[in-house]
Image (spheres, rainbow, N blue to C red):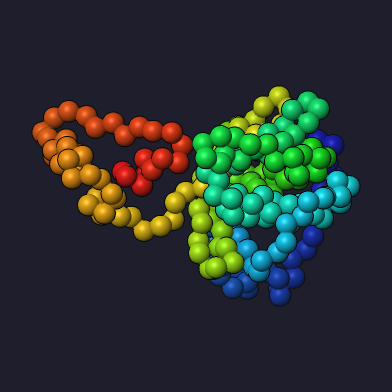
Amino acid sequence: LVTGVQTCALPISPKTSPSNQPAATAASPAPEAVNPKLVLKGKRAFRTKWSIYDPDLVVEFCDQILRHAINDGCSDIHIESFRDKARVRMRMDGALQIMDVYTDYLFKNYQAVTARFKILAGCDISEKRLAQDGAITITDDRGKDIDFRFNLVPTKNGERIVMRILASDQALAIEKIGFDPEDYKKVIDAITAPQGMVLVTGPTGSGKTTTL
């Protein structure tokens, strides 16, 4: 019994009688979510000034950040928000450098920018309290696919994003990596030993993943 709700019964005509209705067919399964693939078309000139009150520039703003990182050979992109500022940092030659050209627009449109990157990475844009991981694949103006590993973590001042550019080149055979003959023999002996451990260490961008 539901109180406080008025109900009424409607007569069922012969044409709409359940016995005269065709049997329901099984609903087709919903398509699986697929991460959108961003295609960077043409060689667009880089903006050096952004109108901070124009939210329609968010898509172009995010695209340029990715272009900038690829063109400059960066390995990481950090997008961070603080109480009174926001910034984009890119890791070049192992050192993080602040990209001042993006600071003002990012601070004014931070939530829209993070939402755009979350869409590209296939993350849930409505979830803002949990960390999320994703991946972005873009095609540059040369037709080459470039993969980004995407990580997002919530903070007191908004969500922070870190993207790592992954090498998309084909894997090399171990004899083609460039080991000296003596080092090559040591590596082969180590990885074929029945016991022990091989540690691959080095700074960012030194070739650890490529070697493995």
The quadrant in which residue 76 appears is top right
**Front residue of 55 and 169:** 169
Q: Residue furthest right?
A: 53
- Residue at 59 percent across and 35 percent down: it is 96
Give x and y (percent) for residue 62.
69, 51
- Rendered view: 62 above or below 193: below
Residue farthest left in this picture: 194
Residue 123 in the image: x percent, y percent? 60, 46
Q: Position of residue 201 (x, y in %)?
A: 35, 32
Residue nearest the viewer, comparing 114 with 180: 180
For residue 197, which quarter of the picture? top left
Q: Is residue 47 above or below residue 12?
A: above
Examine the rendering and report whether any part of residue 109 can be seen: no
Residue 212 visible, this angle? yes
Q: Where's residue 133, x and y in %?
A: 53, 40
On screen, residue 150 versus residue 102, left or right, reads left
All told, the count of numbered labels is 0
Say if 53 sits above or below 24 in the image: above
What residue is drawn where x is 63% and y is 63%?
40
Residue in view at x 85 percent, y 37 percent: 4
Quadrant occupied by the N terminus = top right
User: Image quadrant for the C terminus?
Assistant: top left
In the image, 112 versus 85, the foreground residue is 85
Residue sitting at 50 percent across and 64 percent down?
144
Determine whether, in the image, residue 64 is placed left or right of residue 11: left
* Residue 9 as seen in the image, left or right of residue 154: right
